[in-house]
Image: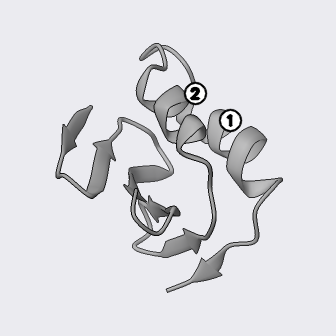
Amino acid sequence: RQLKGEKMKTLTVISSNIKKFEYDEENKDFYAHFANGTTYKYPKVNKELWDLLVKLDTKTSYGKWFSRYIRKHYKGTKI
């Protein structure tokens, strides 16, 4: 995993379905970049969720976390 950026935070993960996550702190937009090349934007995501994601144990399934905390609670738009 790798973090970089200032306003836009990036977390590259090891996952069969997810390539990386990004979070725009200024606009509170969460981005999920999938291994198949698609990207979804989820608006108005609380920074606390990003902070939780960054602190995940590397043994945790990022896909399960994403489904539980983002996909089920926020409406994503394919971009």
Q: Residue at x 48, y 31 (%)?
A: 51
Q: Residue at x 49, y 86 (%)?
A: 79
- Mark 1–mark 2 CB contact (< 8 Å): yes
Residue 28 drawn above or below residue 56: below
The image shows residue 32 at horizontal and vertical percentages of 49, 60
Q: Is residue 12 left or right of residue 77?
A: left
Residue to which mark 1 is pinned: 64
Q: Nearer the viewer, residue 78 or 5?
A: 5
Disc 1 secondary structure class: helix
Quarter occupied by residue 44: bottom right
Q: Residue furthest front?
A: 26
The image shows residue 61 at horizontal and vertical percentages of 57, 27
Q: Is residue 44 left or right of residue 39?
A: right
Disc 2 secondary structure class: loop
Q: Residue at x 64, y 44 (%)?
A: 66
Q: Could you tell me which quadrant the N terminus lies in?
A: top left
Quarter occupied by residue 15: top left
Neighbour class for label 2 at 10 Å: few (<14), some, many (≥20)? Answer: some
In 3D space, how far apart are the residues under numbered discs 1 and 2 (Cα atoms)?
Answer: 5 Å
Q: Residue at x 46, y 69 (%)?
A: 27
Residue to which mark 2 is pinned: 61
Q: Nearer the viewer, residue 5 or 58?
A: 5
